[in-house]
Amino acid sequence: MDSNASTARIRQGNGTTDDAEKPNTDPNQLTKTRRFKEFHRRVRGKHVEHVPTLKESLIATTFVTKINLALIFVVLSWVSHYLHWDSRATFVLSFLALIPLEKLLQFCSKQSMLYLGHSIGDLVNVTLMNAVEAILAILLLKRDCKLKLLQGTIIGVIILQLLLVPGVAFVAGGSRRMQQELHASHTQLNQSMMTMGVMCLVIPSAFFAGITPIGATSPEQVVTDEVRSTILKFSRGMAIIMLLVYIASRIYAINPPGDENAGDFYADHGGHEAFKEEEDRLKKEQPKVSPWFCFGLLVFLVVIIGFTAEWLVHSIESVREGANIQEEWFGLILIPIVSFSGDGLVTFTYLVRKTIFHNGEAPHALADAQPIDLAIQFTLFWTPLFVLIGWWIGKPLPLLFDIFEVVILLAAVFVVNYIVNDAKTNWSEGFTMICLYIVIALVAWFYDGQAFFETFFGCVGHVVHAAVTGEAGNSTTTAGSSGGGH
């Protein structure tokens, strides 16, 4: 007893304790260390039997899809821009050039999942697949008199990813199967996030409707400098909150609480064997490109897409006016379709092979719900980020949207949440989603936009900037004459 006490005193005198000599047995710390080592090992490609060489990576990337033949349009779009060809030619060539670039970006992002793991890889994959739309939006934000077109594009991208893209995927996936499964836990989280995102866009419209004087007949009676300033202030506050909500949801998905989860939200398979089979397939799948080739190509593609998208944005106005297309339809439908053209072509070919020629791979038990993840990220991450970027560069962008845009977004979220509520889908539900998108596109063709919003936005240099700096004077009158009309 005395010897034990003496030993304890000696250890205390030396600044050591029994606890200090024991190895770290904290399960949380051990799990984090093990996960970091596993992640580092995966990134270097140590988990696969064979890491592709540079030559193998180049060959795999070149022949991954026949759509790569359309890469010639990338060269032609750059030539058209620098040689000052007709604006319509530049627009069409840039539009076509973005299709193969988008498909290559998708290929690389999916390959990166094999090195980054499911949770982090899925987040990177979703972010990169939103890259084209995000770049287009930022380019529109930088240009004068394009705020209304930008807002239409934001809503257009979201409803495309909520309705058309998953609808086509559900039709293709369910064409030879009675129903497909969705991840139950993932679906519940998505429903909450999507509802939160759309409510953050509804509330500013409700506020604006509430302060509109009864019987107001002209935009000048409603859109004052004080109203603009107020809406911009709370839009920026809401943008920060929306970003926090999205970041918190990703932290939860990547590293959920509880030792039994092993740091993987997707480990909860919702009781369906197909999810376990999919996880096993991803672990065994051999990558087609090396990790550093993959990451380097991703950076290169983002740069090329950025410049090509800029050529497209530069030619937008002359093309829209020449074709006599409503600005609302141009932003809601045409610009977002850029990102879906490649997938749409591939899916159509796949459907023809399966339904007419009875060819193609066996039907899969899991439904492709990733487009809904894209819509959630674009709503809760990219949209508020555009608001903050606009604040930083002096191009104020509010979260106040046209009432028509808000209503169609509400309708899309309602239908999608109802369809995926049971974590199951079929081709009939997918067809319903496609039809709703067509209905929206049809009505938007005849919609010219609210006069109040035309006055609110106008040209950045004349209206919104004046409202922010206080140098308004006759800014309201200027808005009426220089608004972003059609």
Image: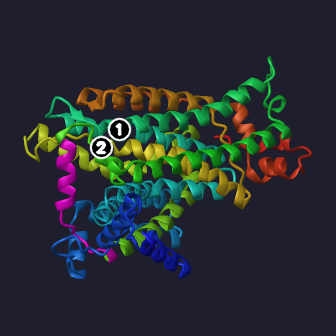
Q: Is residue 276 magenta?
A: yes
Question: Image check: 476 left or right of 365?
Answer: right
Question: Farthest front residue?
Answer: 2
- Location of residue 462 in the rendering, given as x and y in whole percent from the top left corner: 80, 50
Residue range in magenta is 274-292
Q: Quadrant of residue 65?
A: bottom left
Q: Earlier in the sequence, mark 2 or mark 1?
A: 1
Residue beneath the point at 22% across and 41% down: 366
Mark 2 Cα shell of 10 Å, populated few (<14), some (14-19), many (≥20) = some
Taking 328 as reference, is 22 above or below it? below
Tell me if I can see residue 335 in this picture.
no
Q: Nearer the viewer, residue 19 or 284?
A: 19
Q: Amino acid at mark 1?
A: Ser
Tell me if I can see residue 348 in this picture.
yes
Q: Amino acid at mark 2?
A: Asp
Question: Image check: 86 left or right of 438?
Answer: right
Majority secondary structure of magenta residues = helix
Q: Are marks 2 and 1 in contact (CB under 8 Å)?
A: yes
Residue beneath the point at 25% across and 72% down: 289
Residue at which label 2 appears = 268
Quadrant in the picture for the C terminus: top right
Q: Quadrant of residue 121?
A: bottom left
Residue beneath the point at 83% across and 44% down: 478
Q: Nearer the viewer, residue 389 or 267?
A: 267
Residue at which label 1 appears = 185
